[in-house]
Image (tube, rainbow, N blue to C red):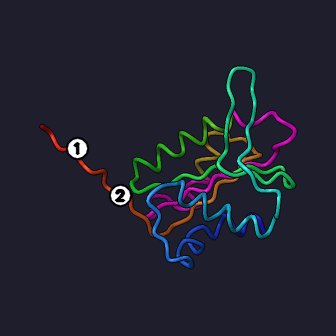
Amino acid sequence: MFENILQSAAKIMKSRGLTPANETEITKQIREVLQFAFPGEVRVPTIEKQLKSYKPDIGVAALMAAVEVKFCTTAEEARSALDGIYADMKGYTGRDDWRSFYAVIYMTEAFYSQADVDREFRLVKAEYSWKPYVVNGAGQRRERKKQPTS
């Protein structure tokens, strides 16, 4: 059920009539759906290390599972998202209270397929405790308003 919800991120956004502009909007909707399935168990965890603390986007304590959400509107952002996930792998692992990790890579176009990302994870020898999910759905970053110059 947990993995199905993560893989359904685009369906969740569409069913709610939302077009996300950033990962925070997607994370919020996934978290709300997870709270129905896992009441009282969904939170934003903190993974403490000696010098730094890490904060996955979503955690379900009962499953010892943490989720990182990435929002990509360009191929460059998709590559950057993968780099960020690789960095997170090192920071998130090694704690007994969080053992399974998921990356929801929400792409507004099919920059990469699930097979592409799975193959990339194998090539970089990604941690086995991590599972990536490529999700394709509607979305567009909002343009920032330019500040008037005086």
- Residue at image mark 1: 147
Give the quadrant of residue 135.
Answer: bottom right
Residue reaching furthest to the top: 51
Image point 56% across, 79% down: which residue?
A: 15
User: x%, y% of residue 24?
Assistant: 54, 54
Q: Quadrant of residue 28?
A: bottom right
Image position of 74 with respect to 128: above or below: below
42 left or right of 87?
right
Look at the image and say whether residue 114 sits in the magenta stretch.
yes
Residue 101 rendering spot, x and y as whole percentages: 73, 48
In space, the residues marked 2 and 1 are separated at their CA atoms by 15 Å
Q: Earlier in the sequence, mark 2 or mark 1?
A: 2
- Residue 61 x %, y %: 83, 51
Task: Identify residue type, mark 1.
Answer: Gln
Q: Viewer-proximal residue, 77 or 146?
A: 146
**Magenta extent:** 91-118
* Residue 86 counted in the magenta span: no
Give the numbered dot on residue 142.
Answer: 2
- SS label for mark 2: loop
Q: Is residue 49 above or below residue 84?
A: above
